[in-house]
Image (cartoon, rainbow, N blue to C red):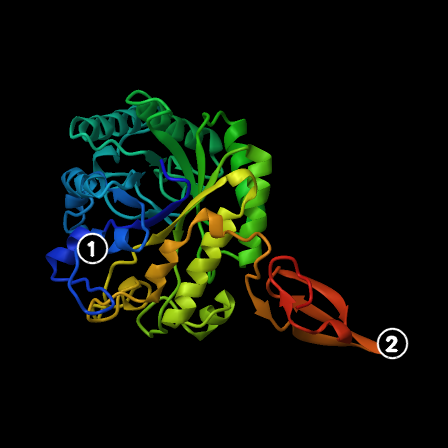
Amino acid sequence: MADFYKGMDLSSLPQGIAEGMKVKDFDGTRIAPLALAKKYGVNAVRLRIWNQPENVPEAKGYCNLPHTVNMAKEIKRYEMHFMLDFHYSDFWADPGNQTKPLAWKELHGQALEEAVYTYTREVLLQLEKEDVLPDIVQIGNEIRSGMLFPDGAVPDYQTMAGLINAGIHGARSVADKERLKVMIHLDQGGRYQFLKDWFDQALEQGLMDFDIIGLSYYPFWHGTFMDLKETAQRLIQDFHKPIMVVETAHAWRKSSMGFIDEEQEKIAGFPATPEGQKQVVDIVMNIVASLPEEMGQGVYYWEPLCVPDGQSGWNESMGILAEDGTVMEAVKSFLFTREQACPNKIAKIYQPKVITCADHYVADEFPFYIITDNFAGRSGRISMQDTLPWCGYDRRRC
C-alpha cells in the first residue's frame, strides 16, 4: 500500500485511444499511456462507471462495466491503486446533474434503494470475479447537492442518506473495509461551511460510517489554496476521516473553446501555461501531503491524458498533453513524495487589492486602507506598511 497516492482519472482513455490519440514522452518517443504515468510517479488510477451509457448517444457506450473491467486489468497490470467512482447515472453526475439511470426512472423509496444496493453489489462482484476489485469505491460523484434526482436531492437529506447507505451496504456485502474503502465525494473543496453543513445533516439523518472524504478542488472554481488547506484541516478535526483530493486540474493555455479565460486565470492565481499548470499541481500535492498526522492521503488529476480535438471543452487546455500528444511539465508533479512535503511552504504571493481609502486616518504616519485579502477570502484594514506581498500559507509578510 502506497504512503501517498498520486493519481490520474483516466476514464476517457479508452475512447481517446480508439479515436487515434498518441502519447509521447518528452523526447517524442511513443509510449503506452499507463507506462508514461508510472514512469513519472503515478501510482493510482480512478475510473468512473455509468450504469448503461448505451442509453445516451453522447456517451458512445464508454465507461460501462466491460470497459471498466478491461481498464481495471491494465491498472492492476501496472500495479497501481484502483479507485472506482459510481455515478449512478447513464451519463455525467455532478452537482447540477444527478439523473437517474433510465432503468430506474420509475423507482422510488425502498425500490430505488434496492436498485442501488443490487447494482453496486453486482458490479463489485463482477470485478472481484475478474480479480480486479477496486481498492476504493465512491458512492456517488460530487453529491453535495444530492444524488438520483429528484428523489435524493438536497435538502431531503433523509432520502439521500438512505440511497448512499444502500450503496455502502452493497459495497460492504462484497468486501470489508480492510479490502475495500468507501469514499464520500463532494465538490467545493475549499468551501468549509458548505461541506461541514452537508456532513452534519447527512450524519444526523443516518449516513452510515464511511472511510475517506474525497474532495474536488479546482482553484478557479472552489476557493483559494489557503481555503483548501483550512477546509481539509477542519474536516479532519470534525469528522476524523482521511482526505483525498480526487479531482484537480489547471490549464496549460487559455482557450476560447476551453474552460479557462483571463478572469479564471486570475482567480486561480497562476498563468494558464505549462509552467503554471505544474505549479498548481505541486501546490495541491504539498497541501494534501502536509495535512496533520498524514491524514492527507492523495491527489488525483482529472483526465490529464487528453489532446486538443478542435472541440470546445476540457481537452482544449486542461490535459497535460500537447496537441501532438507530447507530455508536458505537469507530469513531473507526480514524482512528488510525502517526504518532500513542507507545511510552511508558500502557496502563492500576491498583492492585496486596494478597494477604498479611509480618509484622514493616520496612525504612526501611515494611512490605513481597506483591502481584500483575495487569497484568504477575507477583508480587513491594514497599514500602508503592510501592503507588501503576503505569503499564502500563513499570511506573514514575505
* Total residue callouts: 2
Residue 282 shows in the view: yes
Looking at the rendered image, the quarter that the N terminus falls into is top left
Residue 272 drawn at (x, y percent): 40, 71
Q: Which residue bears the numbered disc 2? A: 362
Q: In the rendered view, would you say 256 is above or below 113?
A: below
Amino acid type shown at disc 1 = Pro
User: How many residues crowd around disc 2 within 10 Å: few (fewer than 14), some, or many (20 or more)?
Assistant: few
Horizontal relation, residue 73 to residue 174: left or right: left
Looking at the rendered image, the quarter that the C terminus falls into is bottom right
Q: In the rendered view, would you say 86 is above or below 163?
A: below
Q: Outermost residue toward the front?
A: 339
Q: Which residue bears the numbered disc 1? A: 33
State if disc 2 and disc 1 touch (CB < 8 Å). no
Front residue of this view, candidates 107 and 85: 85
Horizontal relation, residue 148 to residue 20: left or right: right
Q: In the rendered view, would you say 114 is above or below 65?
A: above
User: How many residues crowd around disc 1 within 10 Å: few (fewer than 14), some, or many (20 or more)?
Assistant: some
